[in-house]
Amino acid sequence: MRQVDSTQNRRKQLSRRQYAQILAGAGIAGLAGCFGDDGEGNGDDDGNGGNGGNGDDDGNGGSGQTDPQRETLRVHVDNVPEQAQLNPWAATPRTEGELYFTEISAPSFLLEGETLMSGHTWDASWTDEYDEISIPTMYTGFDIEPPYDVYDYYHEDLTYWDGTPIDPQAKLYEDQIYFFNDGHQFNDEATFNNEVVDDTTYHWWQDKGEVEGQTPSPRTEEVLRQDAAPTQNVPPHPDFTQPYVEEYEDADTQDEADRVTEELASESINYYDLAENEWGSGLYQLDPDQMSEDTMIATKRDDHPNEHAVVEEVQFQMASADRRPLLAQQGEVDLSWGVVQESDGDINREQLPDHMQELDRYLQDGGDHLLFNWDANPHLENLWVRRAFIAAINWNAVGNNGWGPERSTPNDHHICMLDNIAEAAFDDEFLDSLYQYPIESDYDLAVEWLENAGYSGSRDSGWESPEGEELTLSLDMNSGQTDWIGATETMDANLSSLGVSTEIVSLDWDSWQQRYNHDNVVYESGIFWTPGATPWEYYEANGQWWTAPLVGGDPESEWSGDVDYEDYSEADNHGRPFEQEIPNDVGSIDAPNEAGRQPSLSDSELISLPELTEALRNPELGLDYQESLEKLARYANFYVPYFTFHTYTWGTWGNVRDFSFPERGHPAHQTWKEFSSEEYHTLSGIVQHKYDDEYPEP
């Protein structure tokens, strides 16, 4: 099994340059005291104690203390045991906290953009007993047979709390229910594409066109590899799923199957049910006799193959999300998620006890675009105008005034994709060859680019297009997204300083959302979230309003959210042409003056965006995956159809007085069970005891 080198962090851990950028943008000199002299948060100690951590090498931190500081690890869960709804097919699930009670499947390793299998290892320098630890997970590996088939391999020694194996048969029951619940049981065009091969092997495949009316869905090796061994995929206990599978199989009509679906949706599983039936899994088992409205206790299992975990008990502080900051301030949470800001936000340095400290901070798989609707505002058709807007905006200030200086980092790579996704998808040589747009406001460049666009005027007098139209821009602002308010106001101020006549359109959630529907795209510009964690989610042809990928839907297709890569119209539902020329000189931004919607370039190549985006998923096109990906990145860099301006930072914080954690920058911090790392830290046994009360200054 591939081992992970904790030194190979690249830029997923914030670099010194980015920390300096954050400090400078915030103007908070005091924040520097939170990090060590080396700029990576290590200072003169190892992160586990003051002035060198655990002191003498006697196994107890040099203090002579034989008992750990704390026996019980406390975490927060926003749920109520009796009101939880853990049935995944329920009409209104309430599953907060459930990740602590399911086995680790194949955790997501953000550094490399991939999942880790059972037996992945970490350097264990924060522990007294181990040089290296190995983490057992549900998946031991997988094989793919492109373009359709995946074989997942299960750990033979992992069980539910009652000893029932977590095996392919349990997974089959779950997938059968999803198949029936989605109404496919009596659909002649649907096939059930899953089977148990043996006790540890599960085989599933994409649609192969095996029945009349079914369209084959071949997938590239890259997509199959990403879909194999999903990050969070432990099936519900078969005692729950098997009876429903049998009821579905006994149904003779769709109406009878629908009645089973209704029965399934109405069944409740709360935390008491989970504990009493022993339906959970993972390192810790809930004790039904130690549960109340505001607390649950889980104890470490003796039958679990994890050999290095030492924390015997986890206490779950069951409280609403708005009470988490209070619990943190009172020192009643030992491990939790998020960045510890200096003074802003719910979790900040000014309010936390000194021994509650940020363990790590890094870039996550989330961020935002500034969208441009070329149809709604004709000025945006002009390549130089879009570039001028980007050059005029201070992207550091946008992040600082929206999300805060400690929660946002401007992207270095301007290819309509987050930096960490880009760095996993492309090599450094390719990324370094692309054009980098200004991060700070560069009004001189913005003016030059507006003049290239054929506009006349000045920053003081405003600008007119070659057709005599005033340069204007409306910025949508979803008032329900509080981070977007300060960010949008900053963009508005920067563009106004350029001489653009701007307005902010403040909208409630429902009114805002309707302006982005595939059949009614009427916004001009505005902030929108990024779509996912893979390159093909960014570079996709899809008109669903919530995705905002590189290519929108086709307004002339039967359903305007679709794009047929073999038969498409001229432009997507944002006014962006489906075919464009890109320069052969990678990184060049040379373009004709007054470059319109579809400029003619010298020494260029004509590309089809629907074809290239399809090629990332569909090997039947016969196009090279990496070459297609790079052409799409070059298109995004040259045309800036919209601008992906920043990535969110994320982190983990914990009680460094009573527990020992990996040092700042250790890749284990950037390993997620689903979203964030606290569940992985807990269930992997990474959290270790401390035997002294020393800890570094925050």
Image (spheres, helix red, strand yellow):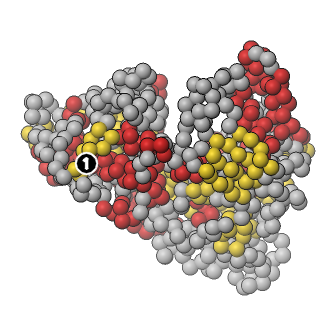
Using the image as rendered, state which of residue 476 and residue 573 is in the foreground: 573
Q: Residues within 10 Å of mark 1 (few under 14, many from 20)?
A: few
Residue 303: where, in percent of width, then height? 88, 58
Residue 434: where, in percent of width, then height? 30, 58
- Quadrant of image for the N terminus: bottom right
Q: What residue is shown at x 70% (from left), y 21% (from top)?
A: 186
Using the image as rendered, state which of residue 696 and residue 314 is in the foreground: 314
Q: Work out whether 407 lies above or below 568.
A: below
Q: What residue is shown at x 18% (from left), y 37% (from top)?
A: 596
Instruction: From the viewer's perspective, tell me whether residue 590 is left or right of residue 526.
Output: left
Q: Work out whether 179 lies above or below 289.
A: above
- Quadrant of image for the C terminus: bottom right
Q: Which amino acid does the dot numbered 1 rest on?
A: Glu
Residue 293 visible here:
no
Residue 688 visible here:
yes
Residue 68: where, in percent of width, then height? 80, 69
Q: Residue at label 1?
A: 605
Q: Within the image, what quadrant is residue 110 found in?
A: bottom right
Q: What residue is shown at x 22% (from left), y 30% (from top)?
A: 378
Residue 519: where, in percent of width, then height? 40, 22
Q: Secondary structure at mark 1?
A: strand
Instruction: From the viewer's perspective, tell me whether residue 315 is left or right of residue 639.
Output: right
Please count the marks in the image. 1
Q: Within the image, what quadrant is residue 499 found in?
A: top left
Instruction: From the viewer's perspective, tell me whether residue 62 is left or right of residue 38.
Output: right
Using the image as rendered, state which of residue 78 and residue 611 is in the foreground: 611
Q: What residue is shown at x 62% (from left), y 80% (from top)?
A: 51
